[in-house]
Amino acid sequence: MSLKIGSLKRSIWVYHLACSPCNNCDIEILDVLTPRFDVERFGIVLVGSPRHADALLVTGMVNRQIKPRLQEAYRQTPKPCVVFAIGSCAVSGNFFRRSYNMAGPVDRVIKEIDPNAIVVYVPGCPPKPEAIISSVVKAIKFLDNLKKKKVKV
Amino acid sequence: MPILYYLVFPGFVFVSVVGLLTAWFDRKLTARIQWRKGPPILQNFYDVIKLLTKEVVIPESANPTIFLLAPAIALSASVLVATMLGIYNMNYNASFVGDLIVLWYLLTIPSIMIILGASASGNPLASVGAEREINQLFAYEFPMIIAFCVVIFRVGSISIGKILEYQAANGPILYSVSGVLAFIVVLFALQAKLGLVPFDIPEAETELGAGIFMEYSGAALGAFKLTKAILLYVSPVFLITLFWGGIKVHGLGLLWAFLKYILIIVIMTLLRNTNPRLRIDQSIKYFWGWMTLISIIAFILMRVGY
């Protein structure tokens, strides 16, 4: 178990899911992946398929059209996996929260199908690259706690 | 004892460790070229262990038997190639007539298993990747065989032990015009076999997602990653064995072998970092055009005596 989480937290492969964002958060995510911030030194790599992913980077308020797709992508991701809700829209709905096509913020949509999902919130409109990296650090600390408590993921 | 050879020393444990360290070296060098810091030294071990401990998702559209068998066969074939090369370099007499052909077949198996696995997964993007992999396989095998013929006809034997003995007596095959040309052809062919960047058309992350590995997850993907790492170790050793006098496992020979190994890896990484990805038709034109021409010129030069 400790080997599992120990290697997971050192090699988080991320898959980028844009769930009706305004693209601002997506650009910040791309900034994080540039040589300037170089997240490969923590083992973070962008992959092209949710099957390879350990973390889903979800941006945007989730509208009704994209909701089943997000849930399907989460189901298809091999567990254990972490969901990052990036940006105010993904965290709370921001000013779309009373919109007619809003299907709920990311955590509600994900927890509908898996109540034990690990969701990391990164507020900001858009969050700075530093904020995204610090959220990854927080997720790693959370995984460490799981390791100490010997919780099954 | 043969099972220990296969599992421990020139075999599985040794080549996995060396292969993963080589893959780290490749990534670190890439990072330094891009003015980054790069991953820590054990990064590829973390990646593979993580993949081995993760859940394996089998898609509904897949044929589960072939889908799961393909990575296992690819891994065992690549380990077998590494073991055979290791044993021949330690003991020239262990070799038998025609083992170069056996090695060439075994080197083809990982590519075929990738094609089978991708086709069995039932994913349209993976099937496009598999189609490209088939095209590429046909493209690079042809010049590679002609380049092998340069070595075979020069030595007058298909046995790797004889090739090594010849090089120990007459100097490496690389130190001649035909040898250099054939070396270049095999280097490019192995680059294509490994799916490194100018020839990573089947994987093509920006076009096909992950291409041939699209549906693989967990331990199955880990086995494929390990196969790629082992092939990354096999290809320089193969080049050194065929063209550069082999690896002498005692005294200064080991240091020279290490330097040759690093040099070939650096060349492959630089090729990977300084070239954009080709289209599949460009890749085939490149191998059936330029590379075939160079290998035929090498063959003629070898017959004339250069």
Image (cartoon, helix red, strand yellow):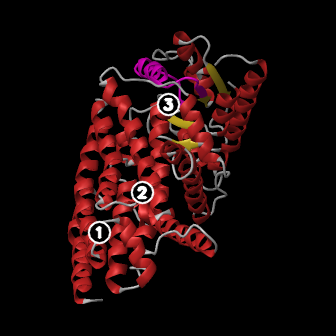
What subunit carries mark 1? B
Instruction: State which tag comes first along the sequence, 1 or 2.
Output: 1
Q: Residues within 10 Å of mark 2 (few under 14, many from 20)?
A: many
Residue B215, x across and y down, in percent: 38, 32
Name the residue at 63% across, 21% down: A118
Do dots 3 and 1 share one subunit?
yes
Is residue A63 highlighted in magenta?
yes
Is residue B45 highlighted in magenta?
no
Instruction: State which tag comes first along the sequence, 3 or 1.
Output: 1
What type is the residue that disc 1 sits on?
A: Phe
Q: Residues within 10 Å of mark 1 (few under 14, many from 20)?
A: many
Q: Which residues are magenta?
A: A56-84
What subunit carries mark 2? B
Residue A148, x across and y down, in percent: 78, 23
Q: Nearer the viewer, residue B81 or A55?
A: B81
In the rendered image, which quarter contains the C terminus of chain A?
top right
State the CA–CA distance, disc 1 to disc 2: 21 Å
Using the image, tell me which numbered label, if any, was put on residue B196: 2
Name the residue that disc number 3 marks.
B218
Residue A82, x across and y down, in percent: 60, 26
What subunit carries mark 3? B
Do dots 1 and 2 share one subunit?
yes
Instruction: State which tag comes first along the sequence, 2 or 3.
Output: 2
Name the residue that disc number 1 marks.
B148
